[in-house]
Image: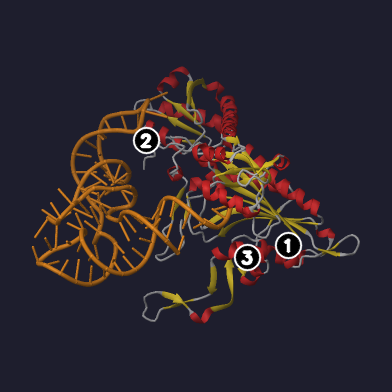
Amino acid sequence: MSNKGITPRNEDYSQWYLDIIDRAELAENSPVRGAMVIKPYGYAIWEKIKEQLDQRIKDRGCKNAYFPLFIPKSFLSKEADHVKGFAKECAIVTHYRLKEKEDGTGVEVDPEAKLDEELIVRPTSETIMYDTFSRWITSWRDLPLKINQWVNIVRWERRTRPFLRTSEFLWQEGHTVHETEEQSLEEVLGALEMYRKFAREVLALETLTGIKSESEKFAGANDTYGVEAMMQDGKSLQFGTSHDLGQNFARVFNIQFTNKDGKLEYPWQTSWGVSTRMIGAVVMSHSDDKGLVLPPKIAPIKVVIIPIYSDNDKDKILEYSKGVYNSVKEITEDIEFDDRDYVTAGYKFNEWEKKGVPIRIEIGPRDLENNQCVIVRRDILEKNELPVSNVQEYVENLLDEIQKNILKRSEELLVSNTYSVDSYEEFKDIISARRGFVHAYWCGNPDCEEGIKVDTKATTRCQTEEGRKNTGPCIYCGEHGEEWVFGISY
RNA sequence: CGGGGAAUAGUUCAGAUGGCUAGAACGCUGCGUUUGGGACGCAGAGGUCGCAGGUUCAAGUCCUGUUUCCCCGACCA
């Protein structure tokens, strides 16, 4: 299918996903919406992301583990606020066996095999992990405990959108337990900062980080912090969170430890996660009319080499370009040699651009003659001729340069779509005309927040550290308020 | 869960007022010519028109029911 004429501001972003996802046809009558198949190319992007983030998580002292997919219903009943946030959108296992239908037309659920206690397919793993933690932790010597897992989770969303909201998705969830409140707060902010830096350095995304309002925070947390990226249409996309859980879960799951003074205490906990939504953020932030633009650090294929030949010079050109291939391969393993002879060169150019491959090297008769090659960079689609002797060094620098340039564009997008307003009129004008991030004063009253949402569709995205210090009259009611960032969220 | 729309080839769709032996584009297969920006010619394969009833000499088209999908809200990462 063609993807010609896609504009970055076109809200039908699903066109950008053609190379990386597909849909699964699930059973008839299934209420599951938006079942997502991640294609090999899309999964390779995820593996790149995963590998680099996993290293950073381990550098923070976390160890990877795996906890069960199924959570006993009673676990979710323990934390009242927590269950309020998830109970309504869970998949529930009620039976454990099928049997053949008597008329021989297939299988049906065996009514004899009803579970005494239903199992919930994890929407997040706090409860199942903390039940175990209560047995792992007895002494201050067991702390801090830092556990991470890479798993799938299920949330029975009423409305799904490819990559941004699917009923099943992949993520990483980190869970830490600490002796003191200070240590846990340090962890919450540390994880948030890890995400912010990861977004900048690997995904080439400038983000806004800060604390969430009461209505936006995670059910069961004292405070939630978020990582917000800005899409090209000015809408905001939250792709990561970090929660200060306080002692809420420790109390209900009875996690206790004996401190250095011999006293029994509840520890302080955090949890934080990012999901496949990150891929959505990358795609929607960087892509252009020709397709994806992937930052080199997460591109499954960083360089593609396209030999251009006719029958009479085929062997010579293949041999020559293979030499260039071998040379570049010393820099990166993520390289593709596209010698398919059943599609034309123009078709290949287009195809690799659609997939967002950062660098393309074209080699044809002219290059063979001049001992050169043609290098095209995906981010700005600039074409250069280059002596083959310089290829290695040039490619290495260019990958770096592309990564930096994409980040720079992301920074500029965020800066140029960030506004400060004092009046509600001004607020409404900017939100409706440009969306973006709008700094404004808000008194903290949920009614004002809700009123603003009803009027403008904008919600509080987060409050930055400086924002807390800036005060002024609430744009909605005029009462004393602090500065918050508003935006329209995906 | 509210409000709209749609269901016909692998995909996107066309088939006013019933006449169909159901089409197009792209994709797919074969042969040949091509290959520096999505190549071209020729030949082919591919559909019980979402499902179930009904009206009619005749239903993709009209009626009833049903299911699914998409979009917009509410809810959420």
Q: Do the residues labelled 3 and 1 touch (CB within 8 Å)?
A: no
In the rendered image of this protein, does residue A324 appear above or below residue A291? above
Q: Which residue lies furthest to the top in this view?
A: A370
Residue A14, can we see it?
A: yes
Q: Which of A375 and A388 is in front in this view?
A: A375
User: Local crowd at mark 3 within 10 Å, few (<14), some, or many (≥20)?
Assistant: some
- The span from disc 2 to disc 1 (Cα, nearest Å) is 63 Å
In this rendering, position of residue A327 left or right of residue B6 = right
Give the secondary structure at mark 1: helix
Residue A50 got which mark? none
> Would you name the residue on which mark 1 appears?
A248
- The span from disc 3 to disc 1 (Cα, nearest Å) is 13 Å
Indicate which disc, 2 or 1, sits on the residue closer to the N terminus.
Answer: 1
> Would you name the residue on which mark 2 appears?
A341
Q: Which of A364 and A461 is in front in this view?
A: A461
Give the secondary structure at mark 2: loop
Whether labels 3 and 2 share one chain: yes
The image shows residue A204 at horizontal and vertical percentages of 59, 36
The image shows residue A6 at horizontal and vertical percentages of 41, 37
> Would you name the residue on which mark 3 appears?
A83
The image shows residue A35 at horizontal and vertical percentages of 47, 57
User: Local crowd at mark 2 within 10 Å, few (<14), some, or many (≥20)?
Assistant: few
Residue A276, can we see it?
A: no
Q: Which residue lies furthest to the right in this view?
A: A261
> Which residue is drawn at the image coordinates 73% and 47% (left, top)?
A60
